[in-house]
Image (spheres, grey):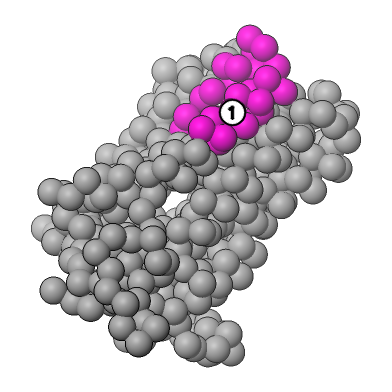
Amino acid sequence: MVWKREETDTSKNLNKKGGMTLALQQPYTPKDRSFWQITLSLTLASFFIFASMYAVQPLFPVYVEEFNISISAASLSLSLTITGLIVGLIVLGFFSDRHGRTSFIKASVAGATIPFLIIPWTDSFFLLLCLRFIQGVALAGLPAAALAYLHEEIDRGSVHVATALYISSNALGGMAGRVMAGTMTDFFSWHTYFYMLGGLGTIMFLLMLRLLPASRFFESSELSFRHDLHGFSYHLRNPRLLLIFGLGIIFQTSFTGVWTYLPFHLQEAPFFLSLATISLFYFAYGLGVVGSPLAGWLAGHFPLSSVRLTGIFVLCTGIFLMLFDAVWIISIGLALLCLGFFTAHSLTASSIGDLVTHHKGSASSLYLVSYYIGVVTGSSMLGPLYNSQGWPGLMIFLALLPLIYIVIVRSTVKIGN
């Protein structure tokens, strides 16, 4: 039993004492209705947020044709969203530690919804990009506050259940957003798809208002913004952490690079596939739900570095299979790509805790930032290589990139376990 300061004065069973609102409460467990309200709310919100984030990736060929722009320009509809997300993660994470959790979670869903209702009205790709950047900043509100909210409100023995469901919905949302994009655009239009996402976001926001309980154990941080910056600068001077952050960039560059240019490749000879058919390949993301827990289980029985290295080889093998012209081989390659990526990524992220003794939140945030820098690199920076070397040249580069980086890392300093 613990006494904590209440975030609002609307909860039940409160005692007023000297102007301070106190409540005798316990963290939620699966026996409590509020545990499932929190879990359901954050899982649905995460699904929507990540579906919104990656909704445009299969639409790059459509934007190239409709707006008469280059592939690199079309990819900015994702890259600028991720850039906004990076900005939001840093800024909103700071404010969430000082002003609460639930307001940022709800605002994130609302802020992600509104652009979907505005973008279809414009015929300006520049305005589309501006709105996607703003949407990216809004998207950051959920990841900036959700995990902290879970750990504050849910019992330590049960929080891993809620966290696992929340994280799994990230991959499911990203997969669903991509699959629905191709299908809806092929049968209707991308405008209709955006309206559908806007309607879905509105429903999610109303559910947040209804289901998400107010924070009970939130304690405002009294530390200054300068203190947070000190934590960032401390980690950026740690060479072993820099190598970890580099891994995040490299993994995601190769992973995103394949998915960014895959629709263009499959629309050309000898495939000539429709956008709806191409979108089905994104079901390979389902292996991301399997890859993370599988990596955790393997790391409990084998050295972390060995499992991570195996994940990297699986990832690179999947990319090399992209060089074949048989659809079934490409499908296997994508499955290996996703399995290897999520295995290597989850273990790289988990190794951060072993390398730092304080400012662990800052270290995790920096890895997340590096992860999304890789998304930007893989979506917008590879256009010249694709234009000059084509699909084979791009795939060879993306397959060799993690291997070369690992050789460099292992020859300089040992990271992780």
Residue sitting nearer the eye, 71 or 2: 2
Residue sitting nearer the eye, 256 or 321: 256
Q: Give the range drawn in magenta.
A: 174-203
Task: Identify the residue shown where x is 51% and y is 59%.
Answer: 103
Helix, strand or loop at mark 1: helix
Image quadrant occupied by the C terminus: bottom left
Residue 287: percent from left, percent from top:
33, 35
Task: Identify the residue shown where x is 22% and y is 46%.
Answer: 33
Instruction: Count residues near mark 1 (Cα–Cα under 10 Å), then give few for <14, some for 14-19, many for 20+.
Output: some
Q: Main secondary structure of the magenta part?
A: helix
297 to 118, vertically: above or below: below
Q: Toward which corner of the image does residue 60 lie, by quadrant?
A: top right
Residue 94: percent from left, percent from top:
54, 74
Please say whether residue 320 is visible from this viewpoint: no
Three-letter residue code for mark 1:
Gly
Residue holding disc 1 = 199
Residue sitting nearer the eye, 242 or 231: 231
